[in-house]
Image: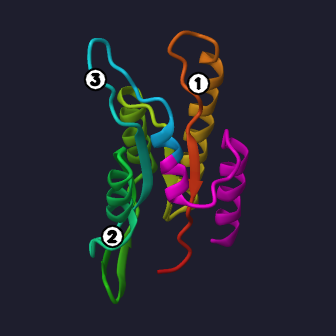
């Protein structure tokens, strides 16, 4: 488990296009301060922020808490769920990790429609899910590099790693 965490931290630091953020709120604030997406003939839309993390059935952490924070910062939150937990305010009683193909499908569907200005990574659950998140980060960074200089090009998203080691 520790080697997986180190692998993920290394991947995120390598793939991140910006200097490491000191906090989730600073990365979301940076995304919110970035130029808004402006659809043709429409008002600006809020920056898109992904949270790739576990779901907390108790509502106090994970995807649920991330989406509240993202919304509070004036951004639109999208989620890709890496684990389902059975938990309350007193502890976790079970964890289920979905297949890697399903995480990939969640991310591919989102990025095709709503490219992120920031990505927050939390609980990944398994080594295979961590490797898939690394693949996704490399892919969106290479897309941004390939599009650089073209009209409407997007900068690579801010990336925040907030690993969950124990709950």
Q: Main secondary structure of the magenta part?
A: helix
Element under label 3? loop
Element under label 2? loop
Q: Earlier in the sequence, mark 3 or mark 2?
A: 3
What is the C-alpha distance between the residues marked 2 and 1?
32 Å
Residue nearer the viewer, 90 or 124: 90
Q: Please determine whether, in this image, residue 80 is positioned above or below residue 153.
A: below
Residue ID at (67%, 72%): 2
Residue nearer the viewer, 98 or 80: 80
Q: Residue 43: within the magenta?
A: no
Quadrant where the N terminus is found in the figure: bottom right
Residue nearer the viewer, 167 or 103: 167
Q: Earlier in the sequence, mark 3 or mark 1?
A: 3
Question: Looking at the rendering, which quadrant does residue 9 occupy?
Answer: bottom right
Judge depth for marks 3 and 2 and give the one in front. 3
- The residue segment tinted magenta is 1-29
Look at mark 3 in the image and give the residue it sits on: 43
Q: Please determine whether, in this image, residue 143 is positioned above or below residue 19.
A: above
Extreme residue in the bottom direction: 90
Q: Which of the labelled discs sits on residue 143, or is there none? A: 1
Q: Answer with left or right where residue 163 lies relative to residue 79.
A: right
Q: Please determine whether, in this image, residue 72 is positioned above or below residue 164.
A: above
What is the C-alpha distance between the residues marked 3 and 2?
34 Å
> Residue 44, image x and y in percent?
33, 26
Q: Which of the labelled discs sits on residue 116, or is there none? A: none
> Residue 155, image x and y in percent?
58, 28
Q: Are marks 2 and 1 in contact (CB under 8 Å)?
A: no
Look at mark 2 in the image and give the residue it sits on: 56
What is the C-alpha distance between the residues marked 3 and 1?
26 Å
Dot 2: few (<14), some (14–19), or many (≥20) neighbours within 10 Å?
many
Residue ID at (56%, 32%): 140
């Amino acid at each position: 488990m520790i080697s997986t965490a180190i692998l993920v931290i290394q991947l995120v630091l390598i793939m991140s296009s910006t200097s490491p953020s000191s906090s989730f709120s600073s990365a979301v604030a940076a995304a919110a301060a970035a130029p808004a997406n402006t659809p043709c003939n429409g008002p600006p839309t809020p920056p898109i922020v992904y949270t790739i993390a576990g779901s907390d059935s108790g509502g106090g952490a994970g995807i649920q808490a991330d989406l509240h924070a993202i919304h509070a910062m004036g951004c639109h939150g999208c989620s890709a769920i890496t684990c389902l937990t059975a938990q309350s305010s007193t502890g976790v009683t079970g964890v289920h990790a979905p297949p890697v193909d399903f995480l990939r499908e969640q991310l591919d569907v989102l990025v095709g429609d709503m490219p992120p200005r920031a990505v927050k990574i939390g609980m990944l659950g398994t080594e295979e899910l961590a490797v898939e998140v690394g693949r996704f980060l490399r892919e969106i960074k290479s897309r941004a590099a390939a599009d650089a200089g073209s009209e409407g090009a997007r900068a690579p998203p801010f990336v925040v790693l907030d690993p969950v080691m124990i709950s």
